[in-house]
Image (cartoon, rainbow, N blue to C red):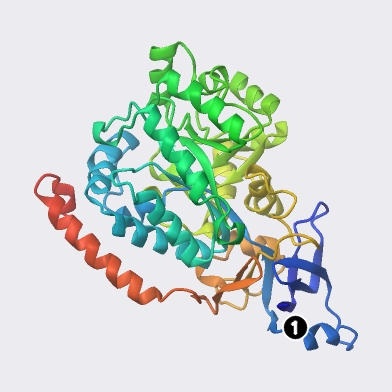
Amino acid sequence: MSNKLIYNGTVLTMNATNQIFKPGYVYMENDVIREVGEWRSDGSLDHLISQSSYTYNASGKVIIPGIINGHTHLFQTFMRGVSDHSPLAQWLKEIIWPMSLAMEPEDFYLAALIGCIENLKSGATYMMDHHYIHTYPENDASVLQAMVDSGIRGHLARGGSDLAGEVRLRETEEQIFHCTDRLLDEWDGAASGRIRIALGPLNLYGCSRGYLERAAVFSRDRKLISHVHVAETSEQIDTTMAHYGLRNLELLNEVGLLGEQTQVVHGVWLDDGELELIRAKQASVIHCPVSNMYLASGVARVPEMLRMGINVALGTDGPGSNNCQDNLEVLKFTACLHKVNELDATLLPPMDVLRMATVNGAKAVGRSADLGSLEPGKKADLVTVDMLKAHISPVHRASSALVYNANGNDVDLVIVGGQVVVEKGISTWIDEQEILQRAQARVDALRNKLAGQYPIFSNIE
């Protein structure tokens, strides 16, 4: 039996009462949390130290549940910073599609592996990757293998589009559902349950009604999460209105794809009736504030959603529209975006934002029973963040320091399922420098290949 003890730090349990232990401890047996409580230096808890194979003195650090990154696109690690001034439609046509079509299976592995490491090192122990580039049969397996190798909990939403704007990225319905079934057979539950598969119709303007209706039946029959881009820009509303006479969320509901296992990604341009539909159907919204700001897509009605009782979780979105996947950075953007949007400084206090990143994220992926908080019986997924930094200390409230001061570089320790995957801020499973050097060489080669047809790739300093 492998026992681990993290002690003498500030524990934000994120349980139902937001209980805090200062100083506190978390004691784990194998992949499960067994005890969480107040740490006492009188010797009464020394038996936990003696019976632990791994101990970590968290003095000066905050201990939190692993963050759940509700939406990203790992392949876009190869595309960050190509252009910082393009709206969504242009960004897709001139950057995302050309690069993704040029990438090979090894590129998808390298991009995903860097993305997994980045997520872990910024506090995410679980992420939902919306993968929709299927130019090679091996692409999905490349991404999933990267998840396995990094040590993260990875949920791959197998994307699909039969009407994609880039014709070479389209698939038939038969291809989409056959490949998803194969992934379920070969990968769902892999790596001791760390790997899961979801269904990911790309969006509501790149998918035919027939495909969406079949997706609803497919996901319901197999009890899968449906992860869909919805109402990200105002133009998308115009498109579905023109084609179907329905707004985005209305179409999602009419084809049967809206329910408790639905993740509405972005949901920026939703009207009152659509919010009510989400509430009634108990779907979750995945809010990606940095991406929405970066692409000037708009501001989702998150404070209103929360007041209505809608479950809102957080995501980084892909590195092509962020440009990083710093999960701690997302916390500050979430709070500040909505305060300034509504001119109300009282909105989204720190603990509310932290709950979106942990408890709400666990609910969105159907894992409230075993993830999202530090409580006995839950999975041993936790993160420590170093508060003894010049940009953080002195600390008055740990929650405030996490949301407004900390960033991914302050993460010191990450444990996933009782296994140490980041220690002293470094991946313990992967040789980061070797992977980064391989990736840079491949990106340089891809850029040279694309520069003739797409000048934007040659105009990079």
Q: Residue 297: tell me if it is visible.
A: no
Give coordinates of residue 273: x percent, y percent.
Answer: 61, 19
Q: Determine which quarter of the picture holds residue 291.
A: top left
The residue wearing badge 1 is 52
Q: Nearer the viewer, residue 361 or 351?
A: 361
Q: Residues within 10 Å of mark 1 (few under 14, many from 20)?
A: some
Q: Give the residue displayed 63% in from the left and 27% down from the top.
A: 278
Give coordinates of residue 229: x percent, y percent.
Answer: 47, 34
Give coordinates of residue 39: x percent, y percent.
Answer: 83, 78
Q: Quadrant of the N terminus?
A: bottom right
**20 displayed left or right of 102:** right
Q: Give the residue displayed 30% in from the left and 55% down from the top.
A: 105
**215 displayed left or right of 282:** left
**93 displayed left or right of 275:** left
Q: Determine which quarter of the picture holds residue 93.
A: top left
Count the numbered circles shown.
1
> Under tag 1, what secondary structure?
loop
Give coordinates of residue 136: x percent, y percent.
Answer: 29, 47
Q: Give the residue displayed 72% in from the left and 65% down from the top.
A: 397
Q: Give the residue displayed 66% in from the left and 23% down from the top.
A: 276
Q: Nearer the viewer, residue 181 or 266?
A: 181
| Kind of residue sitting beneath label 1 | Ser
Q: Is residue 365 above or below residue 68?
A: above
